[in-house]
Amino acid sequence: MAAIRDTAGSRRAVVLIDGRSGAGKTVLAEALAPRLGAQLVSLDELYPGWEGLEAGSDAVHETVLRARDPGWTRWDWASARAAEWHPVDPDRAMVIEGCGALSRANRPLATFGLWIELDAEERQRRSSARDRGRFDRYWQPWAAQEDAFIAREHPRDLADAVIAGDVTGSTTRG
């Protein structure tokens, strides 16, 4: 927490939390945001469907963190269409979590980047348990999008800290 505040200095804190599906991004973000007094944006709300990782990542710099009229449009998963607009306070701290949050275009707009690391078997087990198996059929297509994003953007290398998703430890780089 101190590292995040120190990195932000006099600017508002903007934390990007990334990692593969089931790594623990949402749990960490939901714990961190209140401690920072931050707005929480989950890319799960922005992805336009199961093929939308890239669009969700782009939305971070194109709408959520833009200088004028920042915010995002929620994706209505049930009706498979865009829903309501959610403005954000450009002066208030923000935590943005999701696969694709930590990209080369998004990183300069943030004060701190976190990557959560966890093995594939445990991530898939967690994801299936969390969603009661409803989305298991999307695991491989989504993982392919993650693979492409990671190969191109190298989000782990963009992170200020790499955290073990099993919560048994972490490594921090300065």
Image (tube, rainbow, N blue to C red):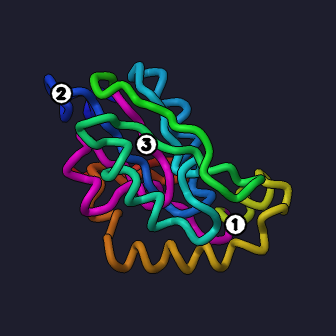
Front position in the image: 61 or 167: 61
Measured as percent of width and height from the top left, residue 75 is found at: 61, 50
Q: Nearer the viewer, mark 1 or mark 2?
A: 2
Please, what secondary structure does the residue beneath circle 1 have? helix
Residue under pointer 3: 96
In the image: residue 9, left or right of residue 47: left
In primary-sequence order, the first of circles 3 and 2 is: 2
Please, what secondary structure does the residue beneath circle 3 have? strand
| Residue at point 77%, 53% (across, down) | 78
| Residue at point 36%, 25% (across, down) | 89
Please, what secondary structure does the residue beneath circle 2 have? loop
Residue under pointer 1: 124
Residue type at mark 2 is: Arg
Q: Quarter of the image holding residue 127?
A: bottom right
In primary-sequence order, the first of circles 3 and 1 is: 3
Magenta stretch: includes residue 127? no
Residue segment shown in magenta: 93-122
Whether tag 3 and tag 2 are in contact, CB under 8 A, the answer is no
Residue under pointer 2: 11
What is the C-alpha distance between the residues marked 3 and 1?
22 Å
In the image: residue 64, left or right of residue 174: right
Measured as percent of width and height from the top left, residue 71 is found at: 41, 38
Front position in the image: 39 or 133: 39
Q: Quarter of the image holding residue 142?
A: bottom right
Measured as percent of width and height from the top left, residue 86 is found at: 50, 34
Q: Residues within 10 Å of mark 3 (few under 14, many from 20)?
A: many
What is the C-alpha distance between the residues marked 3 and 2?
16 Å
Above or below residue 113? Residue 105 is below
Measured as percent of width and height from the top left, residue 69 is found at: 32, 34
